[in-house]
Image (tube, rainbow, N blue to C red):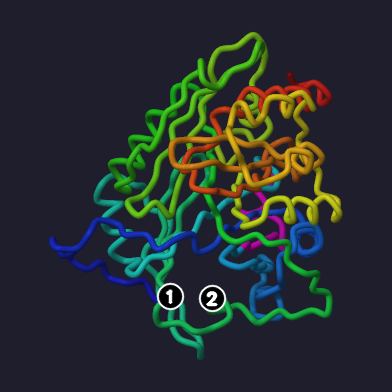
Amino acid sequence: METLELEKPSATRDFLPLNGTDYLELYVGNARQAAHYFQTAFGFQPLAHAGLETGLHDRESYVLVQDKIRLVLTSPLTKGTTIGQHLDRHGDGVRVVALWVDDATYSYQETVRRGAKSFLKPTVEEDKSGRVVRAGIHTYGDTVHVFVERKDYNGVFLPGFASWQPEYQPTPVGLRHVDHMVGNVGWDEMNVWTKFYAEVMGFNQLVSFDDKDISTDYTALMSKVMSNGNGRIKFPINEPAEGRKKSQVEEYLDFYDGPGIQHIAVATDDIVETVTQLKSRGVEFLQVPATYYDDLLSRVGDIDEEVSELRKLGILVDRDEEGYLLQIFTKPIMPRPTLFFEIIQRKGAKSFGKGNFKALFEAIEREQELRGTL
């Protein structure tokens, strides 16, 4: 492993082209059990492993894949590690959002030059399958972005990882790729971080929601959606807003002890089939009142799906000028009420379900009330 010297950027190159999400690394208390859960419940397939058997002595990681989605689940093996400190503060959650790039050194150089705080200097990792270059920067809270350049690598995942193919391999459920990832930040921090993504990473603001758009009788929040140039990476940023009771963002910030990834939205081509399978495997979803579906077609127009099927599964629908989308949200999947997943199917729509906000957040408030945190 070696640290690279920074190259002088070319003035003719586009700034920070991103090919997509490379992987998401979650720090968890028990990576082996977490891997079993994501295999069983969400249909992820085993891909790679690193730990004592591969020469690591401080941590263990399991890599799972489903179509274009890669999850890395990492736990500490000894006391006093930064991973353990992260878990003690935040509980299980997303630490690394890795972004696939053609040139990790250039991506690091440009973002640091524009104000990003360095997390990992450009570093070459090699094994018999080739070389990978990784570099990283800090973002909100303890979340980091790692740029991954893998054009000269044909191994199973990254150098230092071995293929992991256990007998237990439940079938996939139809998850295709990461659609977007939502971050929760503190009071008066949303504009700070949208400015960061605009100025440091070259993102554009797609849409903005204020407390009039996202509110119920009790709670409110504000949100802005940032997207990179080709639209493959979308990061909505949420901030609490004043309300009569504690909002979901405030609850998250309390239990996560600071900003972090609130939910991961993963796309499917058939949400009815995917959610049916997920429910059969024990995944629990937020439920909106049955009355939500009484006037659904008058609100969103004609859709291909049967309303009775959507009602049975609790799937929400919203429409914009480009088409419509279907979405549903799991309950928190970790011990703390922090990280959850969204399952989404887009049929032309480019938006994020504004028409569902009130019903969704009322459902979240019912869960908060049960937890005694509303």
Tell whether 344 sits left or right of 108.
right
Which mark lies nearer to you, 1 or 2? Answer: 1
Instruction: Say what secondary structure mark 2 lies in.
Output: loop
Instruction: Decide: few, some or many residues near mark 1? Use Cα within 10 Å; few <14, some 14-19, many ≥20.
Output: many
Q: Amino acid at mark 2?
A: Leu
Compared to residue 371, the image places residue 22 above or below, namely below
Judged from the image, the secondary structure of the residue bearing numbered disc 1 is: loop
* First to last magenta residue range: 71-88
Q: Residue at x 74, y 80 (%)?
A: 165
- In this rendering, the answer to whether 291 lies above or below 55 is above
Q: Which mark is residue 158?
A: 2
Q: Is residue 80 left or right of residue 336?
A: left
Towards the viewer: 291 or 141 = 291
Neighbourhood count class around disc 2 (C-alpha, 10 Å): few under 14, some 14–19, many 20 upward: many
| Foreground residue among 13 and 48 | 13
Q: Position of residue 63 (x, y in %)?
A: 65, 68
